[in-house]
């Protein structure tokens, strides 16, 4: 009992001595620290009062997984180096691995008593739900990686409100490669028809590898095999249009084609348009048939004019 009482008296005397002992700091250090902390406190108070900010307690966990212990240590060292480059420090949860893992899974329970106070704008950086993802199932094609989340972008453009697409980029950025990759994906995944208008014959090898058909249009009218190949603007069938009359649409198309060929300031005269429309409506119907397999040869400009 005497030893315990003496120990208590010595401890109280030590506390009193420490309390009454003045602490000396280098000149200017205390003032600089107080000025820095005071400025940060004023800025934080201003954010909370005037900028609609709130204070949150945040626990940020980084989960590292590997097949071997050595690889895991290397990954932890690499993650610590990345954090250090960004003025942050990662603390390894020694003897708290299970608590850290259970806090990382989406159970809504934090078992790690390490927290830091952050404002609303600072906390919002760690919320991953602000990223807009595009990940469709079915006959969806691969269109790259999301720049924010690095997740794949899988999209079926036929299901979108606007299925049209445009590939833009600087020279050498991979526009042709992106187009060929999308064509290959569409060929392997979907049953869609792929039609390529290729003035520079850039996709010729791709079409050959996919066992496609190459139609060469040239002023000489000869294809790759030397046989004649032409485009007949008078070609038509009953499936030419689902809503309007196929014959009326074909007549409008021929009028526009002739208007483009004639050119000039005045273009086609009303009499010319009447003759063309009458000729198309007179010559095309005999070549139509309910069954496309039984349809006669298509009308041409020779048979119409």
Image (spheres, grey):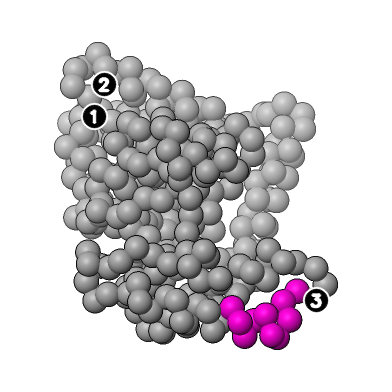
Q: Earlier in the sequence, mark 1 or mark 2?
A: 1
User: x, y (%) of residue 137?
Assistant: 24, 56
| Residue drawn where x is 43% and y is 56% of the image | 131
- On the question of residue 183 being in view, the answer is yes
Q: Is residue 50 above or below residue 281?
A: above
Could you say whether the residue bearing mark 1 is in a helix, strand or loop? loop
Image position of 125 (left or right of 110): right
Residue underneath mark 3: 266
Q: Is residue 279 above or below residue 296?
A: below
Q: Which residues are magenta?
A: 267-276
User: x, y (%) of residue 293?
Assistant: 22, 64
Could you say whether the residue bearing mark 3 is in a helix, strand or loop? loop
The majority secondary structure of the magenta stretch comes to: helix
Magenta-colored stretch includes residue 275: yes
Tell me, yes or no, whether the two marked residues, 3 and 1, touch with CB atoms within 8 Å: no
* Within-10-Å neighbours for mark 2: few <14, some 14–19, many 20+: some
Could you say whether the residue bearing mark 2 is in a helix, strand or loop? helix
Task: Determine the image quadrant of residue 273.
Answer: bottom right
Q: CA distance from mark 2 to mark 3?
A: 79 Å
Residue underneath mark 2: 72
Please identify the residue farthest to the right as the structure is shown.
265
Tell me, yes or no, whether the two marked residues, 1 and 2, touch with CB atoms within 8 Å: yes
User: x, y (%) of residue 179?
Assistant: 46, 43
């Amino acid at each position: 009992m005497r030893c315990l009482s003496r120990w208590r008296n010595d401890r109280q005397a030590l506390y009193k001595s420490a309390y009454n002992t003045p602490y000396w700091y280098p000149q200017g250090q205390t003032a600089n620290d107080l000025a820095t902390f005071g400025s940060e406190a004023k800025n934080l108070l201003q954010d909370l009062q005037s900028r609609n900010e709130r204070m949150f307690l945040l626990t940020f966990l980084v989960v590292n997984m590997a097949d071997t212990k050595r690889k895991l240590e290397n990954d932890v060292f690499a993650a610590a180096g990345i954090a250090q480059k960004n003025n942050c420090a990662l603390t390894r949860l020694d003897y708290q691995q299970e608590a850290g893992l259970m806090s990382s899974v989406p159970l809504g329970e934090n078992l790690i008593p390490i927290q830091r106070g952050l404002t609303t704008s600072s906390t919002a950086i760690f919320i991953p739900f602000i990223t807009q993802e595009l990940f469709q199932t079915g006959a969806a094609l691969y269109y790259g990686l999301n720049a924010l989340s690095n997740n794949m972008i899988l999209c079926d453009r036929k299901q979108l409100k606007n299925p049209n697409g445009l590939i833009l980029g600087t020279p050498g950025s991979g526009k042709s490669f992106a187009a060929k990759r999308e064509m290959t994906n569409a060929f392997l995944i979907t049953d869609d028809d792929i039609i390529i208008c290729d003035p520079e014959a850039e996709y010729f090898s791709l079409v050959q590898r996919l066992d496609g058909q190459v139609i060469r249009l040239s002023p000489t009218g000869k294809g790759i095999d030397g046989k004649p190949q032409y485009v007949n603007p008078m070609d038509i069938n009953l499936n030419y249009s689902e809503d309007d009359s196929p014959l009326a649409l074909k007549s409008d198309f021929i009028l526009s084609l002739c208007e483009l060929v004639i050119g000039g300031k005045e273009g086609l005269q009303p009499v010319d348009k009447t003759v063309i429309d009458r000729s198309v409506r007179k010559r095309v119907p005999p070549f139509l048939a309910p069954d496309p397999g039984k349809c006669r040869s298509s009308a041409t400009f020779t048979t119409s004019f």
